[in-house]
Structure formats: structure tokens, C-alpha cells
Image (spheres, helix red, strand yellow):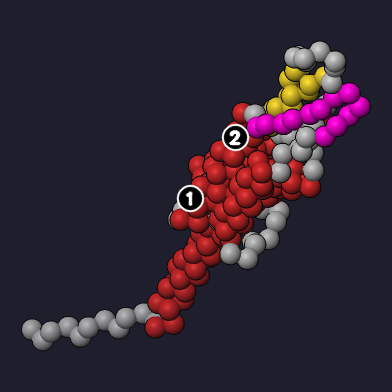
Amino acid sequence: MERAVDAAIRLGRAWRALPGERRAAALSAAVLWLALFLPWYQASVVTQARTRNPAPVSESLSGWAAFTTIEGLILIVSVGIPLLLFLRAEERVPRLPGGDGWTVTLAGALSLFLVVLAMFSAPAPVSRGQYVLSTGLEWGIFVALLAAAGLGWAGGRMRHAVDQDPLLARRATAAAGRREARSAAADPAAGASAGPASPSPAAPA
């Protein structure tokens, strides 16, 4: 119970530390993960009976039900991006080459490509005994498409944000504070080394 409470506190603290564009990236990745549970394909099952007009039966397949390498890569992206942002908020991960903005942008582009590939790689009609299956697209895969596009958009916002890396921004602020402290400490020393000013001679009466 204590671990769950501690995890919730850490998540809340990390969420508050994230700028708006990073929150948008985390939400897009979360929607992409949830989209795997939505219906992606519509399977029409037709009974091979001796009747002239056999009644078809419709069945929805989620991303998990039609899980392949494509869905596996989408799962990695949808879990990896929120994890990266969480660790970045806790300052527990080094800076990536190109910054987090490029990482999120490339992840969004990859997931967008994978969702489009999944649209054209729908499960092919197969024969199962006395059934013939034909498949089509369902609305859940379009939710995944929008989430992937949102992830790429959030990455672009991160790249153009002034404070695109909170860790570097805090380090820069701390370094500027140390420089100001050293400058303030150096001024009294400079004044002391110069010695007291000699009094000016009095003017003759």
C-alpha cells in the first residue's frame, strides 16, 4: 500500500513538473496504448452451409486480438515515451542526442507509419473448417492514427519550446546563480585589496 501511495505521489510530482507540450506527448502516448484495446478490424464470419443465403456473423478484433510485430512496436512506443518523460521529470535519465523533442518526434513518425502499415496489413481472409473470414477496418485503428499524429505534433512543439529540456534549464539556472555568487564574493575582496582611500589634504586657509 505504501509503495502504491509513493508511486502516485511521484507520478503527480512528475506530472506537475512537465511543461504543456510534454504533457501533450504523454497523453498522446497513453491514448495510443489505450487504442490497442479498441476494435481495429471487423471480421465477417460466413457459415458454409448448404443454404443459398448463409447469414454472416460480424466479429470485432482489437489490436491485441490481431497482435503482430507491428502492434508490438506500437506498444513499445506507447510505453517508452511516458517512461522517458517520467524519468526526465525526476532527472534520472541523461540527455539524449538531439534532445527529447527529436526523440518524441521520431517516435510519433514511427508509430504513424506503423498504424498506416497495419491498415494495409489487415488479417487476410482465411478458411477455418466450415467458416470463411473476411476482414475490414474498424474505428479503433483511426483513434490510434490520430494518437500517433498527436505524438509527432507534441514532439515538434517540444523541439520549438524555449524550455525544451527542464533538466538543462535547471542546471543553467543553478550555474548562473553560482556565477553571480562568485562575482558578489569577488567584489569585497577587490575593494579590500585596494586599501582605504587616503584623505584629501585640507585646503589652506
Kindly identify the residue that appears in the image at 62 percent across and 50 percent down.
113
Disc on res. 170: none
Q: Is residue 160 above or below residue 151?
A: below
Q: Main secondary structure of the magenta part?
A: strand
Q: Would residue 102 be seen by someone viewing this image from the given angle?
A: yes
In front of the other: 39 or 13: 39
Q: Which residue is mark 1?
A: 157
Q: Position of residue 114 (x, y in %)?
A: 67, 48
Answer whether residue 167 is visible to the viewer in this image. no
Q: Residue at x 57, y 58 (%)?
A: 102
In whole angstroms, how far apart are the C-alphas of marks 1 and 2? 23 Å
Q: Secondary structure at mark 2?
A: helix
Which element type, helix, strand or loop, lies under badge 1?
helix
Residue 5 counted in the magenta span = no
Residue type beneath disc 1: Arg
Say which quarter of the image contains residue 184: bottom left
Quarter of the image for residue 41 reads top right
Q: What span is in magenta?
A: 126-137
- Residue identified by numbered label 2: 142
